[in-house]
């Protein structure tokens, strides 16, 4: 009997060893970092002031895909985060913008709205959110499926969309920041109540403490020589301030909202992410877990102050420190060879039009109010006093299909009326019929970008294509969302587990990220994936 038991034990031991040997090779943890509104050149422009253990370490010891681009337009936060994690484009995953006009209902839809869930962690509707509008799976979903749902996925960002969409449909939690009370919250889609560790973090009131510090430059302001002078007339003022200059008090209006437009928004995100790693024991439970982080403050600062501002430079110098702290923590807890980290951005950004015009470069502001007003007059002249134009967002115009059909209006004639009106506006380049992009008189590169961004259920009828460096509606500050390289060219770094130091200049696209991760992690790519596996040297 004893001999039989010993033999059985040896057989089981051998079986377990065999299973362990046959287990797919994966790291203990995957950490995805999306830096909101990060242009590729920021890796190099501020490099002489970065520390050795943050972005420069990822570039020095990891894979740097130097010609990485978005392959669709419009490039905005929700679409960008969705595309990074789904390995596909808005035409497939359905997130065509931060919001859109739904053709079936005629109603405006926010990308992560979900009236069937409720807020968890505070009062109000800031938690009425879920990934239900995302039509495909994500790499985070696929990694969980590959491990029979035994692994954990946690997603964190100041912006709800920056957490929810990367977390996918199967995330254990997605957390975002609520400015009303300076708290991290979630929705009932994920849980009924905040975990004890999140409640404890919120009780520390870190947002309140950070904003009370105010925001001055990390170094002496006269050392910020890669940026324009501080008193930029084309920059936006923060609430409660008379000029867009340092120091910023962060006490005007609601300081808990102002933290977003400061480096402290990134720092508190880093703090919360490290707390999540500790409390959830990510990567320490025998599975490959996933932590998705989005640093949102770079976008708020970028919109307000622009790429040439001292505010932006200071924000990136501080973000570099936050990333260094995160990498150091990962080294200590897991070891570099047990964590796979990637870093990219959800879009890039244009220069402030006023600033570049002052330097004798082309660009300008497209007057949205005047353009829409003139268009409505032109439509009234052509078709009478009827409501044809029912919405405009993402540089797209939405028309009332039922009225057009009832009145027998030719789409060709309608487009001609719109074109003739828009041609009178400064900055206008072309009008694209989104139902016939292949027939547009633009180069094939831009046709492909627009086709990838078009979704018949959620996109408009016609899209305005402006000249390069022209923005819609910004009198100060800047924006993004065009087909041009200054909006599409973003960093892509891989670091850690099995990643060898190298730079590649072969063109890569955002769709390639999740496809590559799936290949490396030995799991299926997301359900709508169109990307290719990035080929290294």
Image: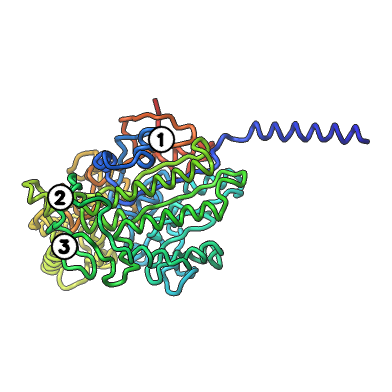
What numbered label is drawn on residue 368? 3
Q: Secondary structure at mark 2?
A: loop
Instruction: Farthest residue to the top: give it.
Output: 537
Q: Nearer the viewer, residue 68 or 56?
A: 56
Q: Write the residue at 41% across / 40% down.
A: 513
Give 220 or 381, whichever is nearer the viewer: 220
The image position of residue 376, as x and y in percent, is 15, 67
Q: CA distance from mark 1 to mark 3?
A: 38 Å
Helix, strand or loop status at disc 3: helix
Label 1 sits on a secondary structure element that is loop
Vertical comparison of 122 with 135: above or below:
below
Q: Is residue 283 visible?
A: yes
From this view, report whether residue 337 is shown above or below residue 197: above
For disc 2, the marked residue is: 228
- Give how far across and how far down residue 289 sits, in percent: 54, 47
- The answer to the question of whether label 1 and label 3 lie on touching residues, with beta carbons closer than 8 A, is no
> Which tag, 1 or 3, sits closer to the chain's start?
3
Q: Position of residue 387 (x, y in %)?
A: 22, 71
Checking the image for residue 532, the label placed there is: 1
């Amino acid at each position: 009997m004893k001999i039989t038991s010993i033999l059985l034990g040896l057989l089981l031991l051998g079986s377990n060893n065999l299973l362990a040997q046959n287990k797919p090779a994966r790291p203990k943890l995957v950490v995805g970092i999306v830096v909101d509104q990060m242009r590729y050149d920021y890796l190099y422009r501020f490099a002489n002031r970065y520390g050795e253990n943050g972005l420069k370490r990822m570039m020095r010891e990891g894979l740097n895909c130097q010609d990485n681009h978005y392959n669709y337009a419009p490039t905005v936060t929700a679409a960008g985060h969705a595309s990074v994690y789904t390995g596909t484009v808005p035409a497939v995953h359905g997130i065509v913008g931060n919001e859109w006009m739904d053709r079936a209902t005629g109603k405006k839809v926010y990308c992560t709205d979900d009236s069937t869930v409720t807020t968890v962690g505070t009062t109000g509707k800031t938690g009425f959110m879920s990934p239900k509008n995302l039509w495909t799976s994500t790499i985070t979903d696929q990694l969980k499926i590959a491990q029979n749902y035994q692994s954990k996925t946690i997603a964190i960002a100041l912006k709800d969309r920056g957490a929810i969409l990367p977390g996918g449909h199967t995330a254990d939690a997605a957390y975002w920041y609520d400015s009303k009370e300076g708290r991290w919250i979630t929705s009932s889609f994920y849980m009924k109540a905040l975990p004890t560790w999140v409640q404890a973090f919120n009780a520390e009131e870190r947002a309140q403490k950070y904003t009370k510090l105010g925001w001055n430059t990390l170094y002496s302001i006269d050392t910020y020589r890669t940026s324009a002078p501080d008193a930029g007339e084309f920059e936006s003022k923060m609430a409660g301030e008379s000029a867009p200059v340092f120091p910023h008090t962060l006490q005007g209006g609601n300081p808990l909202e102002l933290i977003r437009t400061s480096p402290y928004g990134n720092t508190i995100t880093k703090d919360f992410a490290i707390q999540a790693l500790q409390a959830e024991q990510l990567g320490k439970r025998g599975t490959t877990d996933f932590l998705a982080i989005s640093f949102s403050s770079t976008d708020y600062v970028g919109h307000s102050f622009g790429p040439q501002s001292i505010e932006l430079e200071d924000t990136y110098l501080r973000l570099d420190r936050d990333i260094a702290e995160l990498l150091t923590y990962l080294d200590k807890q897991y070891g570099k060879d047990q964590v796979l980290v990637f870093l990219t951005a959800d879009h890039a950004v244009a220069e402030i039009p006023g600033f570049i015009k002052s330097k004798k470069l082309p660009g300008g502001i497209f007057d949205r109010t005047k353009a829409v007003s003139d268009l409505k007059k032109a439509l009234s002249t052509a078709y009478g006093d009827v409501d044809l134009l029912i919405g405009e967002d993402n540089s797209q115009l939405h028309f009332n299909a039922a009225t057009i059909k009832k009145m027998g209006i030719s789409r060709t004639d309608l487009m001609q009326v719109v074109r003739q009106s828009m041609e009178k506006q400064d900055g206008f380049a072309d009008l694209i019929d989104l139902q016939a992009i292949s027939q547009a008189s633009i180069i094939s590169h831009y046709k492909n970008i627009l086709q990838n961004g078009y979704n018949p259920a959620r996109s408009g009828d016609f899209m305005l294509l402006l000249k390069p460096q022209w923005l819609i509606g910004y009198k100060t500050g800047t924006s993004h969302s065009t087909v041009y390289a200054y909006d599409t060219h973003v960093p892509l770094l891989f670091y850690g587990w099995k990643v060898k130091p190298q730079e590649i200049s072969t063109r890569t696209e955002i769709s390639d990220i999740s496809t590559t991760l799936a290949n490396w992690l030995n799991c299926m790519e997301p359900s709508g994936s169109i990307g290719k596996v990035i080929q290294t040297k």
